[in-house]
Image: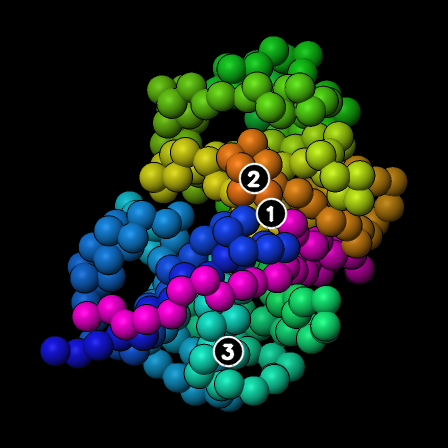
Amino acid sequence: MEKHPFYIVDVFAEERYTANQLAVVGNAKNLSSKEMQQIAKEMNFSETTFILTEGKKEGYEVRIFTPEEEVPFAGHPTLGTAYVIQQDIIKEPVEKIILNLKIGQIPVTINYSEQGDILWMKQRQPSFNRILKPEIISQVLNLKEYEIDERYPIQEVSTGLPTIIVPLKTMNALKKARINRDKYFDLVKDTEAKLILIFCPETYNKENKLSVRVFADYYGIPEDPATGSGNGCLAAYLVKHHYFGENKINIQVEQGYEMGRPSLLFLRAEEKEEKIDVLVGGKAIMIVKGELI
């Protein structure tokens, strides 16, 4: 019976058993799509990744599954899989690892440090799509309209995985937001954007600039403790709308505190010649290594 290396990694974690856990399965080239989907469902993490082929120059073929379906791109699976590749396949420091995903090639660079290595992924050029009305989103989130920050739009943004970005005024609003599932599914049924990211300028940790929550019931994830793809969309949004008064950012963002899995994400973005370059970074920690039979 064929065996597969198996890993569990905490991604966007400052210490063990925080942030977003990822399952990674190696030597997966002979697994069918149905088998991968079943494994992801059994694992029941927000995503499970499968490393199919190896090739240091051409990149590593990787597929990403939620418990419900395959997705073309997601942030913490990209960084966590690159970390596993560096730690257990390459087994030596490298500057860059390329993942070949459904969405295309995503390069991951690694900054090595005694304080903890930081992995960075470059997002695709952002697209800015429809703007939504506060009265609609407030019903989806069980909030009052006045709790949404009307200075900035509620907008669908994509740097790989489309996300609805919702600016809130206060931490109180962020904490009490709850998804109305009927209204949520009515909202997302005719659009590519299934994730809802809400954020506010108040934080649990004073070193961070924003607090974030992400809801993704469509993918079988009521709430995600750390979302690299969604925060990539947020980074592009912040620059596009000059949320901090500039056309560039270099900030720390916190997520997952309401779930008891605090996460830390690093966001860099800059607008140049009508393009916005977006980088999302974070740390990863190996939790479990074994074999999947």
Quarter of the image where the C terminus is located: bottom left
Crowding around mark 2 (Cα neighbors within 10 Å: few <14, some 14 to 19, many 20+) is many
Against 155, is 62 above or below?
below
Q: Secondary structure at mark 3?
A: helix
In this view, the residue in front, 28 or 128, is 28
C-beta proximity under 8 Å, tags 3 and 2: no
Q: Position of residue 221 (x, y in %)?
A: 39, 39
Above or below residue 131? Residue 237 is: below
Image: 211 above or below 74: above
Residue 112 is tagged as none
Q: Is residue 267 magenta?
A: yes
Q: Is residue 163 visible?
A: no
Amino acid type of the residue that numbered disc 1 sits on in the rendered structure: Ser
Of residues 72 and 224, the one drawn nearer to the viewer in this rendering: 224
Q: Position of residue 180 (x, y in %)?
A: 42, 19
Structural crowding at the residue carrying mark 3, measured as other residues with C-alpha within 10 Å and reported as few (<14), some (14–19) or many (≥20)? few
Pointer 1: what residue?
263
Q: Residue at x 47, y 72 (%)?
A: 84
Q: Which residue is mark 2?
A: 256
Which segment is the magenta one?
Answer: 264-293
For label 1, the crowd category at 10 Å Cα-Cα, with few meaning under 14, some 14 to 19 and many 20 or more, is many
As shown in the figure, which amino acid type bears the numbered disc 3?
A: Gln
State the image quarter where residue 288 is shown: bottom left
Labels 1 and 2: the sequence-earlier one: 2
Would you name the residue on which mark 3 appears? 87
Instruction: Report if the CB atoms under discs 1 and 3 are less than 8 Å apart.
Output: no
